[in-house]
Amino acid sequence: MELQTLTGLLGVGSTGPADATAAATDGRRQHVLLAGDAGVGKTRLLTALRDRAVTDGWQVHAGHCVDFGESAVAYMPFSEILDRIVADLPEVVERVAADYPALARLRPVRRVMGANQGSAATGTDRGQLFDAVHTLFEAAAEKAPLLVVVEDTHWADQSTRDLLTYLFTRPYVGPVAMVASYRADDIHRRHPLRRQVGEWGRLPDVERIVLEPLSDDSVRELVRELAPPHGSKIDTERVVRRAEGNAFFVEELVQACCDDDLPVDLADLLLVRLDRLDGAARSVVRTASIAGRRVTHELLAAVTEMKTDELDDALRTAVEQKVLEPTGSRYTFRHALLAEAVYDDLLPGERVRLHARFAEVLKETPGLGAAAELALHAKHAGDLATALRARIAAAEEARNVSGVGEAAHHYEKALGLAADPKVAEAAGVDLDRVYERAADTLIMAGLPSRADAILGERLDAIPATPSVGRALLLATRAEAALGMENGDPLRYSSEAMTALPDDAEPKARCAVLAVRTRMLVAFRRSDEAEAVGLEGIEIAERHSLSKLASDMATSLSMLKVRTGRGGGDKVEGFRQVLRETIDQARRVGSTYAVSRGLFTLGRSYDEAGDHREALRWFRAVIDEVGGESLQWSLYAAGARADIVRIQMVLGEWDEALALTGGNLPDAPPIPVAVLDVLRMMMEQAQGASVGAAAAALRPFWTEEGLVALYGSTVEMIAAGRAGDHAAVLSVYADTVETLSQFWTEWFGGRVRLAVVAASAIAQMLPSLPAAQWPALVEAVDGLRNDGEQVVAQYEPGEWGPEGRAWAARLEAEVLRVHWLAGIDAPPQESLLAAWARAEQQVEAYGDVPGLAAVRTTYAAIQRATGDVAGSRVTAGKARETAKRLGLQPLLDELKALGATAVRQPQATPTALTPRESEILTLVAAGRSNGEIGKQLFISTKTVSVHVSNILGKLGAGSRTEAAAIARRQELIS
């Protein structure tokens, strides 16, 4: 049944390759995630699938993820798949590699130690690598339909998961289908694959199949199939009880004849098979278990030092007894659990000796394995110096294929080993360089705080005297600080300059000058930045340091764009210069300079209110980093958040919400918190209750100001809906206090916060006791003063379209509060004019949901002041946007607005009966009809009649509006 489902989804059938191609064309094919507990039958099902596909003329290539523990090897299954395609279709691989040189990095020969010396991957390489794999599969499928199988993805490294995401989300023209399997019981709550599987499962072209345990009848049938025809009698019911539907357990029990002496424990059960081997075969299998699930013949031969015939005989025995299976040049344990059981059965001394032997062989012949493998074996052998060197090599190997997540992991482990001075001394490594590279990798992985911590640790441990090592550590710390709200990049870059010895080599001097220039540009220290940058460019050009020269040239071009020096009419000219500088940086391979320049262009257009052009450049930053492993580097993470924010403003919420999910399992917490709070803003606008979730992000406020800015907005709106004015003002005060610590006291976003607070108070004001109104009006006036103080900090022309929109909204909200409270109420004409200006400014900025909110309030004010026709037009525009974006709170307001009566002009104060005045006083105090009835000893229905009469006399559309009118006309005290 599962096989039929699987072949149907993948387009594998008995109709042949021609129909497979047709299925690809009309979109019937799905990729498949195959999940199931260990031993439930995933491998058996995939084997059957392979046989069916091959029979039907398909090409089938499989790659396996391997459990190397903390020594993950980037892209391992795809290296294996590429190796198989090279063997079958060498001309296809050669053709694709000619267009995509990065493909060569996946070749197994390139993955071994020493093969990548002198090369380094950039973000562009990673993007090319992903494109290369996709193109290779397409090209291979031209020969015959292609089925790609990636097994055991619960052990996949981050880079492999990223590549799978890329391949799942990119359509194929030809007949290409993919299956990725994983152990469902291994995917615990914090497992990195857990969230990834959820994301993959939501893709339209990916279907998830979960293999459930076999039924008792299926187990009985399987026992009959597996039992030897003339062997010992199998107690089928005993197998049914003990296997509990696990196909692998069934196989193992049947192979072991389900002997009464077998222990219940699975490991012991598996080891029964090992007992049937002779001494030589058992020794080889035990040795193989040290390598993990699979081991190459060459490595096993080198480690065992057995004669060729003896090794072949031992391996043949192990294969015949179904302990090992030959897979190309490797031998693989029939099941990972079997490898684990054999390994666990070794005595401690045996493990140490065998790990030491593997490490010795890998040191002598690096081509037999990867540095990550050497690190694993050396550590378990107690050779910590070798483990440290191998960790560093593994980190650099991962960086060379843009696997910064794995590289950061390896460097962290290396630093743990280097913490012992004896180990570091024995390893003979340059610790300053190791810390610098580790921190740089952490920054690339989006973990600047962690980078800052390890740099501080190292700087505290070395003499505070000038040295190149100290200068470079301080320069790297400045880079980390730039990505932190509470960092001090100017200080660290200045200290780096001071720490440079007079005789520092040009490359080191230029590196420090380049960092100092970047920090000065970031803080718009124009004159000093130009002086430092030009000095660095002169040295770099004199010594042919093209990347560093390009980096500083990009910084200076960014400075002109950011400051707009020379007049606003010259900004576009400065942008063009920056584009040319970016092209130059790209030509010399300075990916970091390119991404910085692209990000600056995006911000330049963003500040000018040119949303489409800003999106173009922010997306270019994402494209430049070339894949998801680098998506959390400083500028890529910033660009992603800016894309979401701009798409929110443009009303492209489906796209924005999709970006806030994404590939986040191993993502650093701070960028994820920014995306989370942006998502909450949209969900809240659609009516969701997310105030508590936003408040839970408060620990990130001091680490990323945007979390505070956006999160407090969500909190204030939630408090406003709850009618808690004290909470609204408290959140505003907390946010201002926090952000003033590392931004400035009068930061631009303070106007936004003031608008949100004033709007929340205006919404709840009519339902609050009149005695509280003066204090709230005074508080709102304070918000207006804050906003005016912010605007005063800007030079004429610096306050952009967004700022003007928020400032106009603040003035309109303040006047609304005064009008509702009847305290220094503005003339009706002034109120309407303020809201008309707010509508105009928000529309000019292009804030689609913000414009809908402004128009909803404006329509209510128009209707309340008698402009029914104008109110209908304004409400209609608001309703159109609210429906499209699902803004339910606005739709509810607009619905209530449509049912309200229109206030008729009153020449004299409205005449109310004494009873109506009494009831109106209680209505204004927020009492319900039932509460009023109890207090006045009349029925609820009678109260309802009185309230209807009051609304009609006042021309009010709601109880809250009636209360506001009564106070303005002094009908109640």
Image (spheres, helix red, strand yellow):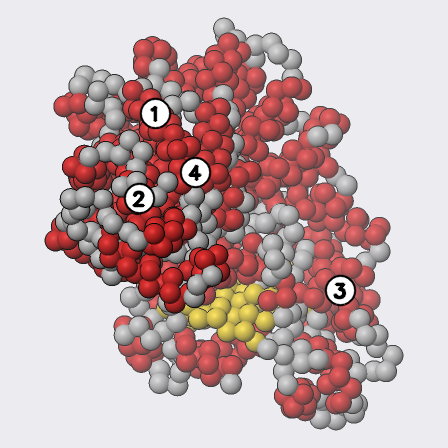
Q: CA distance from mark 2 to mark 4?
A: 15 Å
Amino acid type at circle 1 is: Asn
Amino acid type at circle 3 is: Ala
Relative to residue 342, is residue 825 drawn left or right? left
Amino acid type at circle 4 is: Ala
Q: Which residue is mark 4?
A: 771
Identify the residue shown where x is 51% and y is 26%: 486
Q: Which residue is mark 2?
A: 971
- Label 1 or label 3, whichever lies nearer to me, is 1
- Label 2 or label 3, whichever lies nearer to me, is 2
Residue 277 % position (x, y): 79, 72
Q: CA distance from mark 4 to mark 1?
A: 23 Å
Residue 752 % position (x, y): 34, 35
Using a 10 Å C-alpha cutoff, classify the residue at mark 2 as few (fewer than 14 neighbours), some (14 to 19) or many (20 or more). Answer: some
- Asked if marks 4 and 3 touch (Cβ < 8 Å), the reply is no
Q: Which residue is mark 1?
A: 785
Q: Which residue is mark 3?
A: 341
Residue 833 sits in quarter? top left
Residue 247 % position (x, y): 65, 79
